[in-house]
Image (cartoon, helix red, strand yellow):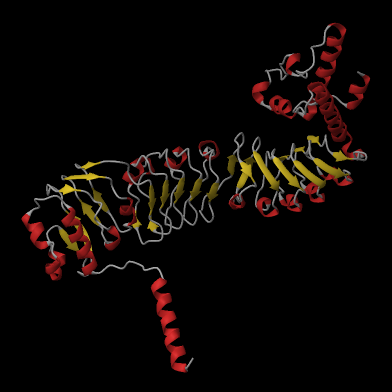
Amino acid sequence: MTTSQKLYALVFHLLFFIFLLPLKITSSLRTEAEALVKWKNSLSPPLPPSLNSSWSLTNLANLCIWDAIACDNTNTTVSQINLSGANLTGTLTALDFAFLPHLTQINLNGNHFGGSIPSTIGNLSKLTLLDLGNNLYEGTLPNKLVFSYNNLNGTIPYQLMNLPNVWYMDFGSNHFITPPDWSHYSSMPSVTHLALDFNYFTAEFPSFILECHNLTYLDISQNDWNGTIPESMSSNLAKLEYLNLTNSGLEGKILLSLAGNSLTGPLPMSLANLAKISELGLSDNFFSGQLSASLISNWTQLISLQNLFSGPIPEEIGNLKELIKLDLSQNQFSSPIPSTLWNLTNIQVLNLFSNEFSGTIPMDIENLASLQIFDVSTNYLHGVLPETKRHDEVTDKCDVYSFEVVVLEIFMGKHPGELLTTMSSNEYLTSTEEPQMLLKDVLDQRLPPPAGQLAEAVVFIVTIALACTHAAPESRPLMRFVAQS
């Protein structure tokens, strides 16, 4: 092949590649005029004479003074369509909004337009007025509104919150500011995705968000909010899966509970964004896999992770210095308990029962000066629980607690974790703080109920066991008393 042939072949391949590239629609006066004329020709006659005569490609030079049309200040693009009260009949199907991207106002009030409202109308990012009232539209409204990455300013129109079927709203990366009163914004029961990030919002947390009970995604990061994170957010937004408050200006702690659902798979890495989380409840789900170190690095207080996690506990658990209660029970954690766990000097409750931990409990456990409840039953640990003179009382009562947990497990036929949680709640205790329950509620339901002297002995042992597992350590009897009993 000669040099010239190679050159022609190269040019051909380049041209062929260029024709394969996706074309981005760009608007001009001609394309805008063609879109308007195409729509006019789809409308049912008769049309107003002024509209029929002016909306013509032969009148392209005068597009900006066509009947019902207005252009921007530069007279280079169509910005307004006002056909209110024109008595027109037809649909919006033939109006291609992609060729009219600079529209700021559309007023079609008082006509006979029917059919559905096209979803492409939501792509008009510069639109400030849309009036489709007093027509014959059918079907549903667009259910996804995306206005992100524009130069929109002012306040978000509260009327948008009245769209009943919208589930996705993205106002991120604009120049929106805080409205005078958030109370004008209604709750949106259908919305699951809401993004207000990268704007200029100030003042307090928007109250209407707390009423959007089906939210799974919320991003209000990169703003100038002030005030605190509402304490009710965790209960009101119980379905939340993604929350981004990065550089939001808000203060306070986050309480997130996803307990009691049927969530599966590994924990989403987006939870690592919850840098201010203080309580995280994930119990009674079906999460699985290993507990990632990058997830827990920013967390400060975990309450419950009773799922199907496996593998070792990350060493980074020792960085959670504010941790006061950690429940990793009833999982599939294995390997030795990480040594960094003994650095959690503020911890009061540590439940690791029903796992697959191995190895011994080191002398470092004496660092846990605040420890009140320590349960590592039903594992593969061995050796002797360390005791020191300085912690005689704490160790004695921790020993009696663990011992009687095993006793209850024998009588119940399962680990008494749920029972102990119920006992620790204020609602469960009377004014004298004495547990109120029936013996049948404690015993293994698969066994016949005891009778006579056997029943008396069982009642006595269970009563001692319940006293030894009292939520308040100071109310538990010492091991010496239990042994003598």
**Furthest-left residue in view?**
49
Q: Is residue 360 above or below residue 12?
A: above
Q: Is residue 227 visible?
A: no
* Residue 416 on image: x %, y %: 76, 27
Most extreme residue toward the front is: 1
Task: Tell me if 230 is positioned left or right of 315 in this view.
Answer: left
In the picture as drawn, the residue positioned furthest to the top comes out as: 452
433 horizontally vs 16: left or right: right
Q: Position of residue 459 (x, y in %)?
A: 82, 14
Q: Taking 103 as reference, is 90 above or below it?
A: above
Residue at image location 82% in from the left, 29% down from the top = 401
* Quadrant of res 400: top right
| 26 left or right of 249 in image | left
Q: Residue at x 43, y 59 (%)?
A: 173
Please tell me which residue lies in front, 290 or 229: 290
- Report the number of discs: 0
Question: Visible in this render: residue 480?
Answer: yes
User: Split into 4 quadrants, where in the image is the C terminus?
Assistant: top right
Q: Position of residue 172 (x, y in %)?
A: 43, 56
User: How far across and down, in percent of the image, does residue 382 sit?
Assistant: 91, 40
Residue 107 relative to residue 277: left or right: left
Q: Residue at x 87, y 40 (%)?
A: 381
